[in-house]
Amino acid sequence: MALIKFDRMKELMDIPRTAETLLNNPEKEIKFSLNLKMNNEEIICFDAFVVYHNVVLGPAKGGIRFSPYVSFGEVRTFAEIMTYKNALMGLPFGGGKSGIKFDPYKMNDFTRIAIIKEYVHMIKEELNSGAYIPAPDLGSSPQDMSIIYGETHRPETVTGKPVIIGGLPGRLQATGRGVSHAAKLGIENILKKDIKKTDVIVQGFGNVGRWTAYFLHQMGARIIGLYDIGGIIYNKKGLDIEKLFKYAPTSKDSIKGFPESESISAEQFFSLETDVLIPAAVENVITRDTASAIKAKLIVEGANDPTTAEGEEILLKNGIHVLPDFFANSGGVVASYFEWRNAKSGNQTCEKEVFELIDKKIDTVFWQGMEARKRLKASLRESFFSISLGTLIEAMKARLWI
């Protein structure tokens, strides 16, 4: 569900009809085909999509997805989420997203590079003008961003690059850093608990899930359950995340069979007695079917759009708090902003400073959300969304769009 419907938000705040119209209609959508000749007998074709949802605050910013299931509708949805995420975090970016419909894990390196180069060729004007700024997302990596940079020869055209060629130290960990800090604030100020006495389960052990678990483990939280595509592990005394990093050193390695754990089913995982559940993998995980089994007291959305409307209704009815994705997983785009700014100015930022900047942004917006929640007497999602909407409406007025 990610975002609240305007009919509900109009009960909480004044939304001009003109602003509603603009925010309900993506500004620009591009669909094209990437066609590669393999030999005289074979041509392979992949659909590709780019969406600008709203750019009142600045150029369209959002990652590029590589997936055999990516669709125009999915890219459109995530571009819209990026509009509100950037507005919430006070960044000078609009909402964008792109996707290429192929399986990156079944593609050899030569063909993968050729696909990315053709993608750049097809939208080179968008990239060179700075109208759209991609970054890693599901299925794509910093190395893929380096290929985009290699084609444009301009470091500010893409973020999430390897550090050695102008990427930001800490960018790889940035989304997980933001999720973990949002979780810490929720634990201490919503659940009123000491993080060192808190149990956490994380669904997903890709880039976001593994770094979220790592930082929370460093803070003293007990990570008692982890769930990845290969299996689910559980230890009621807490999993040793540093040992787990050695057991599954990359996002492609499964946690299945980790020695200091027991294997459990998906049904058991979602019904574990825990303080915090962090869905950090894919969308539509907490549904009408799974929500009723959840015993966590706080959900922190590390993935994009992991909770359906029906699922959230059940959670709220059961007294479970939900920190929404466009707040909780914003650390990645916050770091992307600093990388983009550095590329344009020539500045450099160390990893420690990057993490401090992310923490500070998350802190500021968390307390804005808490104040809005108290004032509006609304859910956390509605409260954070009201801040985003207010920012976008003011920007539209300032630019005479409405």
Image (cartoon, rainbow, N blue to C red):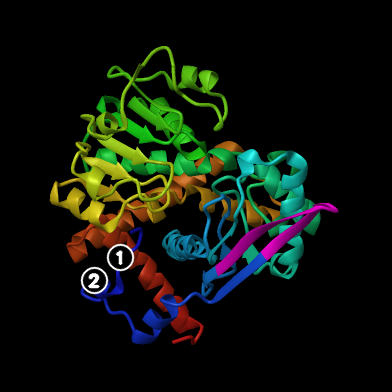
Q: Residue furthest top?
A: 259
Q: Is residue 62 above or below residue 238?
A: below
Q: How many marks?
A: 2
Q: Give residue 226's position: percent from left, percent from top.
A: 38, 29
**Is the residue under label 1 in contact with that under label 2 (CB below 8 Å)?**
yes
Q: Nearer the viewer, residue 334 or 103?
A: 103
Residue at image coords 46%, 24%: 255
Pick the front one: 174 or 66: 66
**Percent position of residue 117, x then y:** 76, 55
Q: Residues within 10 Å of mark 2 (few under 14, many from 20)?
A: few
Residue at left offset 63%, top offset 47%: 160
Of helix, strand and loop, which one carries label 2? helix
The residue labelled by disc 2 is 8
> Is 246 in the magenta?
no
Circle on res. 4? 1
Residue 18's x, y, as percent? 39, 86
Q: Tell me the quarter of the picture where residue 87 sits.
A: bottom left
299 left or right of 211 in image: left
Rendered position, 69 above or below 351: below
At numbered mark 1, what does the secondary structure look like: helix, strand or loop?
A: loop
Residue span colored magenta: 33-51
| Quarter occupied by the N terminus | bottom left
Query: Where residue 239 appears, x then y in whole percent?
Result: 37, 20
What amino acid does circle 1 point to? Ile
Is the residue marked by circle 1 packed among few (<14), some (14-19), or many (20+) residues within 10 Å?
some
Q: Amino acid at mark 2?
A: Arg
Query: Does any portion of residue 211 appear in the rendered image?
Result: yes
Please identify the residue farthest to the right as the structure is shown.
40
Main SS, magenta residues: strand
Question: Residue at the spot x=41%, y=42% of the render?
Answer: 179
